[in-house]
Amino acid sequence: MNTGKYVFAQVLQFVNRYEFEKCVKCYKGDRRVRGLTCWNQFIQLFFGQLTSLNSLRDICVCLKAHKRKLYHLGIKQNVNQSTLSRANENRDWRIFADFGEYLIKTVRPLYANCSIPEVDVDNDVFALDSTTISLSIKLFNWARGKYSRGAIKVHTLLDLRGSIPTFIYITDGKYHDSNILDILVPLPGAIYLMDKAYIDFAALYSMHKAGSLFVTRAKVTLDYDVLESNLNIDEQTGLRSDKMIKLRGPKSKQLYPDILRIIEYYDDEKDILLVFLTNNFIVSALEIARLYRNRWQIEVFFRWIKQNLNIKKLWGHSENAVNLHIWVAICTYLTVAYIKRQLNSQLSIYEIMQILSISAFDKSPLKELLTGYKVNQNVKEQYKLLTIEF
């Protein structure tokens, strides 16, 4: 039981400090550091994300006001805003990125058995997309976006079984989405769901040769020859066609010389005809359409983290500080997802975040808060029995 411990201190018990210190040691993060260590820096930023504070000043003011409780919260010391800001500017962001990678490897298997709505496949299913965060070009002069504005992109590969991010890459706003396919290492047998921005036939063919499957939207200008057409189509399901094709354009067929599949599906809710391009010839055409419908989970994920984590208001202006900030936010999300599984909570990650954000200084047992299970019920019953006997 964690009777008498602050909720934030109970949450920190789920954060593996040993693995974090391994990341710190790898990049010599604590070399010649006397005061604010990387661990204490991470805890304070983690506290800011968990309690939805808007700035470094808010974090420092809040912790200073509760300085007598810091030891019991698991925080070694409070520092001023400038000290925390300098740490964000100078500490290598890869420390926090590597720790995030460790959390991904730890959390993802816990959600491996989660089902995907309306889809019955055993493959790993990922959605690939990016979200743009608008910035001031005067403050973030390294982050060039469109139309002479400042912006960064957070490229994310989301495992749809549990909505767990498995790959994060941060770039400026001008970085084209399809370039991520050159960095991403495809997993054999996995299904990747992407929109039109990822039409890069050379990269898609590399995924195909690696044994990966992809489903994307075909462009209107796509030029191809029909090799075979499936006439057994039930239009009541929304399907309009299912064809085996080969690219006709001189450059396109050179970049992707193999056979592809095109599926046309009419969405009566939005009154739009969707054309899917895939190298998956195993599942049915209707299953392909249902798979792509689940790609919207990544849009929901982006909206969620922007509303519940501090992503849009960055706590530093340099490229290092921005990368560090976003990785701490991702680590916060993964830690909450880990706690949810460890405590077998029926609450959603959103609901858990809301509870933790207002309960950091509470002394209620964490399991009781997140599951409703009275962890000290046995103690109370034993006390009643002793009282009756006495």
Image: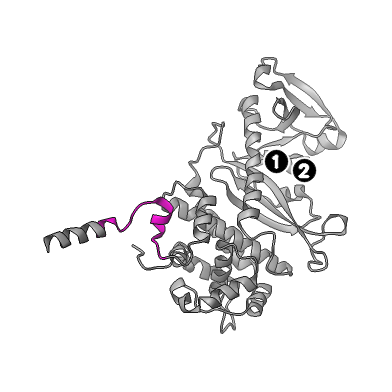
Residue 331 spot, x, y in % from top left: 57, 60
Circle 1 is placed at which residue position? 194
Q: Nearer the viewer, residue 293 or 30?
A: 293
Q: Which mark is residue 197?
A: 2
From where the camera sits, is residue 259 visible? Answer: no
Q: Given the current orientation, which residue lies at the most extreme top position? A: 231
Residue type for callout 1: Met
Q: Nearer the viewer, residue 56 or 339?
A: 56
Residue 272 spot, x, y in % from top left: 75, 28
Q: Do the residues bearing badges 2 and 1 touch, measured as CB atoms within 8 Å?
A: yes
* Residue occupying the point 77% across, 36% down: 256
Extent of the magenta region: 363-379
Callout 1 secondary element: loop
Residue 141, quarter of the rendered image: bottom right
> The C terminus lies in which quarter of the figure?
bottom left
Tell me how many marks there are: 2
Above or below, comparing residue 255 to residue 331 in the picture = above
Q: Nearer the viewer, residue 162 or 208?
A: 162
Residue 232 spot, x, y in % from top left: 66, 15
Above or below, comparing residue 9 to residue 125 in the picture = below
Callout 2 secondary element: helix
